[in-house]
Amino acid sequence: MVILSTCQRREVYLVGNREAVSLVEKALFPDFPKEHLLLRLSEEAVIRRLFRVACGVESLAVGENQVLGQVRRSWEVAREQGWCGKFLNRLFLQAVTLGKRVRRETDFGRTSLSIGALAIQFAERFLGDLRDKRVFLIGTGEMAQLLIRYLLERHVGEIRVSSKNPERARCVQRQFPGIQVFPYGEKYERMQGCEMLVSATEAPHYTVERSSFRKIFPEAPHFLLDLGVPRNIDPQIGELESVRLFTLEDLQNVAKENRHHRLQELEQVERFIDEAVEAFRFSLYWNTLVQALQEDFQEITREELQRLFGETALLAESQMVPIKETLQRINRRFFAHLKNVLKDGMDGVWRREKESCPGR
């Protein structure tokens, strides 16, 4: 059993009968209105579901990369707990492998849809590595906190925060101990020496005015992000020499383009998923078939050896050993070769059949 938990779902992948499934449901989802919130899948639908999750197709932000790591970690936890047998190990290995292939061979997860992530990308494009940069942030709301988290992940050199709400600013500082908090009235003084200025508030007026900003120029930041609604930074500041001012609308336009690009890539990703599902189903069929055939082959081999040497005892037991070992090697090599032939050739055979009989 593997339990996959993300911000929007909890999924349980289980090998067992209906009684086992019922026990797991009662243990993990005791209070859920099952007819509305529990989705039960089986057989091929489970395989396809996990592959789609690992590729980011089922995510709210289609194509996001974080989910692949969540799939991998869930699988690792299950293995550490001894919850995984051969089937789930193979299934999750294929899911992780497919997720990596999608991200390696397509642009499906390379373009960002998050405004916070895009803000950081904009900053890195114009400022380069952020590890030695200083950032001045006005605001302590949800967007501001998201940006702080992204900046800390980039190991930014210094984060200075200012807010009209001192209590909320102190709460944010407790949440992110590495930041510095300054009174709102000192914002122009404190933003001097910073390379980047971000304002993300809902103030009905400008939080950064041209006249005050001009007084500290050129010691003021030259890269500005206005993420406020309405606008926080006086647009005329963007007219100053060497100042780059971007707005929330700029980032939203890029996010829209990225979303369109991801949807274009989705068709190719779906093809990869179809191929992976078929390959996994074939491997299940093959493993069952080869086990039965090998058992039959071994039984036939024993019968024929008994028929040839059993009654007459033409050879001593020590002389029979290399004969039996040779037959075992033939067995292994034959079925390994057959598996490779089928794996490499069936797609081509089916493709040629479809081309010659398009109506089938």
Image (cartoon, rainbow, N blue to C red):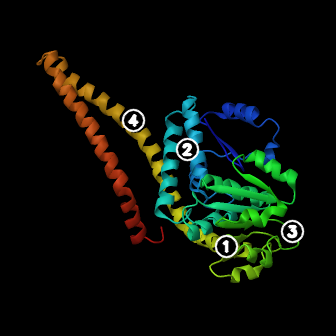
Question: Disc 2 residue type?
Answer: Arg
Which mark identifies residue 256? Answer: 1
Sequence-wise, the earlier of marks 1 and 4 is 1
* Label 1 Cα neighbours within 10 Å, binned few <14 / some 14-19 / many ≥20: few
- Taking the spot 65% from the left edge, 46% from the top edge, the residue there is 41
Question: Disc 4 residue type?
Answer: Gln
**88 and 319: which is toward the camera:** 88
Q: Is residue 230 left or right of residue 116?
A: right
Q: Is residue 348 left or right of residue 61?
A: left
**349 and 360: which is toward the camera:** 349
**104 and 214: which is toward the camera:** 214
Question: Disc 1 residue type?
Answer: Lys
Q: Is residue 143 left or right of residue 112?
A: right
Q: CA distance from mark 1 to mark 4?
A: 52 Å
Which mark identifies residue 291? Answer: 4
Instruction: Place residue 217 in its image quadrant.
Output: bottom right
* Label 3 Cα neighbours within 10 Å, binned few <14 / some 14-19 / many ≥20: some
Sequence-wise, the earlier of marks 3 and 4 is 3
Residue 357 horizontal/vertical position (percent): 42, 70
Asked whether the viewer can see residue 113, the reply is no
Q: CA distance from mark 2 to mark 3?
A: 43 Å
> In the image, which is nearer the foreground, mark 3 or mark 1?
3
